[in-house]
Amino acid sequence: MTLEFTHKLGLGTNKVGGHNLFKDLDEQDGYDLVRAALDAGINVLDTAFVYGLGRSEEIIGDVIQDYDRSKIIIATKGAQNPDNDYKSDNSPEFLVKTVEESLKRLKTDYIDIFYIHFPDETSDKLAAVEALDKLKQAGKIRAIGVSNFSFDQLKEANATGKVDFDEDYYSLAHRDEEQERFAYLRENGIGFVPYFPLESGLLTGRYGAADRDKFDRLDDAKFDQIIKGLDVLKQVAEAHDVTLTHAVLAWYMANPNIGLVIPGARNAEQATDLAKSIDVHLTEDEYKAIDEAFKA
């Protein structure tokens, strides 16, 4: 991991310009929430080409013109090839082209973290990373990431030790990555960035036992464990006079296996509220209690 963060909280921006992913998005809300996040001290913005097919990057590019670029960390992702029905393409040529186009949309001369968003089925993953490393040496990107890679694909991509970040599905409710992947990441100095950290709202207390049908990706035993675990989260949240969301995010930030956590927001109010979790510092006992309640 080659970047240093002032804290571990970033902002996921799929609802910034992501009209192809969410209905009824107000584009002005996207502008406002990015500004609100930056003003509240969240200085890591995580975006991707697929969020609005470049529109999220364009909005962020507009907003950051009014801020000190050196104090903002921008992560973006690419792999979807518009010339091939947006299928994943990890070829060196396409990735280089993708970075150049993202730089233009973001209106910046460097990207802090560029992730290969999804693996394709045929490209040499090491060759893909080596192509990005040339861009890193040229100063166009500062760190190389992979996203949604299997463990074997991650190891292939990192054969020469040039992967800086690994982004994958992980939450208190989905802890599969803790087995062999986390050990490999620690040994190789690769920062881990989980997506879906709030488990689509389940970990925020928005849902309860009656909402079982909304989470069919979880089996009955896991769902029941999560519902019981929420009681522990509530106790911790109450002790700090914060919401469950703040308590969950504080747990991720205290987790030594996690380099950065990137919850999303839909409007400025939500972005400002997320920033409150930066100041929530769990005791060792609170961290362990949450950890045990949700242990796989």
Image: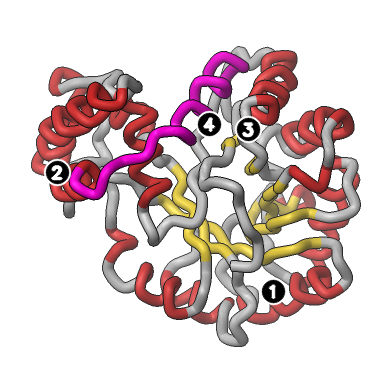
Q: Nearer the viewer, mark 2 or mark 1?
A: 2
Q: Earlier in the sequence, mark 4 or mark 2?
A: 4
Rounded to the nearest angstrom, the CA distance separating label 2 from label 1 is 40 Å
Q: Is residue 157 above or below residue 105?
A: below
Q: Residues within 10 Å of mark 4 (few under 14, many from 20)?
A: many
Q: Earlier in the sequence, mark 4 or mark 3?
A: 3
Residue bounds of the magenta highlight? 266-285
Q: Residue at x 73, y 37 (%)?
A: 53
Q: Which of the 4 image quarters holds residue 23? A: top right
Q: Is residue 108 shown left or right of residue 172? A: right
Rounded to the nearest angstrom, the CA distance separating label 4 from label 3 is 15 Å
Q: Which mark is residue 293?
A: 2
Rounded to the nearest angstrom, the CA distance separating label 4 from label 2 is 24 Å
Q: Position of residue 98 (x, y in %)?
A: 80, 56
Q: Secondary structure at mark 2?
A: helix
Rounded to the nearest angstrom, the CA distance separating label 1 from label 4 is 28 Å
Q: Earlier in the sequence, mark 1 or mark 4?
A: 1
Rounded to the nearest angstrom, the CA distance separating label 3 from label 2 is 30 Å
In the picture of the structure, the residue carrying the numbered disc 3 is 41
Q: Earlier in the sequence, mark 2 or mark 1?
A: 1
Q: Earlier in the sequence, mark 1 or mark 3?
A: 3
What type is the residue that disc 1 sits on? Ala
Q: Which mark is residue 264?
A: 4
What type is the residue that disc 3 sits on? Gly
